[in-house]
Amino acid sequence: MNKLSSLKLRACRRSPTALALAAALCCTSLHAQPFPTIGDYGDAPDGIPAYPWLGILGEYPTCFGGPSGHISHANNTPVAYWGATMDPEPDGNGGFCPPGPYENDECWAALDGDAGLVFPDAFTILAGLPVPCSGSPTPRALGPACSLANWGPMGNLDLLLSNNAGNDVVVNILFDWNRDGRWSGQSSCGPNIAPEHAVVDLHVPAGFSGPVSHLLPPSFLIGPNPGFVWARFTVSDEFPPMPPDWHGDGDFDTGETEDYLFLVGQGGGGGDPGFGELGDAPEGVEAYPGVIGSFPTCIGGPAGYVHHQPVTSAWFGDALDHEPDGNAGICPPAPYDQDECFELPGTPGRDAGLITPHPFTLDAGVVERCPASAGGSLGAICNRAAWGADLDIEVTNATNQDQYVNVLVDWSGDGTWTPNLFTCPNGDTGSEHILVNHVVPAGFNGPLSLLAPPTFLSGYASGLAWARFTLSDTPVPADWDGQGAFLDGETEDYLFAVGASASAARDAAPQLGLTVEPNVPNPFNPRTTIAFTATTAGRHTVTVTDLAGREVATLLDRELPAGRHDVDWDGRGQDGGELPSGVYFARVRGGGAVESVKMLLVR
């Protein structure tokens, strides 16, 4: 699009009512032009889900011919761009507009330096779920809600920018603070206002190349809603200045637009949830077959969250197991990643120090026993259960002050930890808060049973029950529902069987099919071995998935005799290419059973 056409279209879009007829003629002639095949468009969702977990479509102006308008840069002249090079995107997100699936363009720009994003970490959406582009277990968030965002190495945000256009250009930045799928308006943070047009016409002199922070952009207020937000970064030749209520559209001669999905943290002093540790229990997804979990787990989730600061000296088991955004490493919502089944490499069967009973997980709605787990069920219903015999977990307090353990169990199976008491037929009463502020002295390390916790009444109905174990620096109320922000400690959640009949059926099922051993070595580079024993002959498969649940390799798929079998994995994907460092799962299926092991690849 040449400069005259670009100016015409801008005038067309912004014509006053008095020039309506002329504007209509202008628009008709411009829209009759062929579909543009050069230049650059945005990445943000246009006519497809922007926040699938919230059911919100994106109405961001991105695609030429899209339902929400578009943004384009012709770039027929020397250009201004983000990062080290210009990255033309001739038809918007995914190469399919409108609408189209995500193609991770907002990720590749972050990974290869294109678009110049320095920090925070960007996310993309896979199978309807947000996934950190960096692959880091502790992705960096933009900052806490309703906090002031600053630029530069000690701040919240920075990008690299090059202006080779031969003239001054401007930068405009938008954030969807209210997550309504549009850039418009503003949000309230108490008495303060957070405009979605956060940076308006930041001046960039000709020849500039370097971090945006060197241009001394103004600080801006982060919006009030924790969770994910879409942001647009546009460098352009737009004059006169953009309006404060700009919603992200336009046609420009030069420049580039890049869009990113960022994480906003919890405000109110709760810390930055891009770090730290959260729970595992289901929030907004199936907790039991047919029952949605409303357990406080995910920052920005519908039921609240539990959060421990990143620097902690008290934990369950041998070491702190960071989970910066709840179950599956993706919240909300998310499928299970069997985190409740696994611990750090080298401690098989002892997830976060759990000693007994054995935990379960869900796979596509099917209950599976965690591999290599010890102990039996949590005990018979309405039974006076004892620590050590029925329930136990290893605790470490490396601080110089007392810590507190609280344990909740969803006896009712309703997907919540309610504070209500229950009564058994013999008249005994129990609570879902089975252990209240039990003290762990400074320097203690060992099974919790050594600290003589009181006995508790197990549930009144056979079945499955989600339990939360929280070690914290401060006590909680007796009617605690599992949420809160703590400066120290860790939270681990498990799915247990309650009642002999419930556990017997599930204990038997895995024994019919196979037993899977921890992979050796683990961590590994570049090769590891997965060993399993098939108790019956039949078809068996061994696949590898990543943290997002994507199948990246098939290692075995054939008929096998009963007996022990070894399968090697060289850290390569289905296409033969080397996979990056990270956590992967080997999933073995056969004999009517499914078992998994957690593997750590370190390049």
Image (cartoon, rainbow, N blue to C red):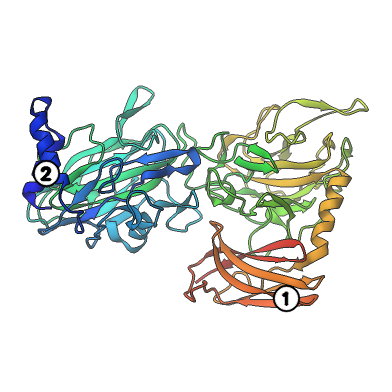
Which residue shows up at 22% across the image and 55% down it? 40
Question: Can you give x and y, in whole percent of width and height, for residue 536 in the image?
Answer: 82, 71
- Res. 76 image quadrant: bottom left
Q: CA distance from mark 2 to mark 1?
A: 66 Å
Which residue shows up at 67% across the image and 70% down it? 541
Decide: marks 2, 1 in contact (CB < 8 A)? no
Q: In the visual, does 404 lie left or right of 534? A: left
Which residue bears the numbered disc 1? 559
Marking on residue 318: none
Question: Can you give x and y, in whole percent of width and height, for residue 427 in the image?
Answer: 91, 25
- Res. 305 image quadrant: top right
Q: Nearer the viewer, residue 353 or 540?
A: 540
The kind of residue on which mark 2 rests is: Ser
Q: In the visual, does 517 lie left or right of 3? A: right
Nearer to us: label 2 or label 1: 2
Q: In the visual, does 426 lie left or right of 190? A: right
Residue at the outermost right position: 426
- Going from N to C along the chain, the mark reached first, 2 or 1, is 2
Question: Can you give x and y, in whole percent of width and height, for residue 276 in the image?
Answer: 53, 47
Q: Secondary structure under badge 1?
A: strand
Question: Can you give x and y, in whole percent of width and height, for residue 440 in the image?
Answer: 71, 42
| Dot 2 alpha-carbon crowd within 10 angstroms: few under 14, some 14 to 19, many 20 or more | few
Q: Nearer the viewer, residue 560 or 456?
A: 560
Which residue bears the numbered disc 2? 29
Count of numbered marks: 2
The kind of residue on which mark 1 rests is: Glu
Q: Secondary structure under badge 2?
A: helix
Q: Is residue 174 above or below residue 395?
A: above
- Res. 47 image quadrant: top left
Residue 317 can be seen in this image: no
Which residue shows up at 11% across the image and 44% down it? 29
Which residue shows up at 23% across the image and 32% down it? 245
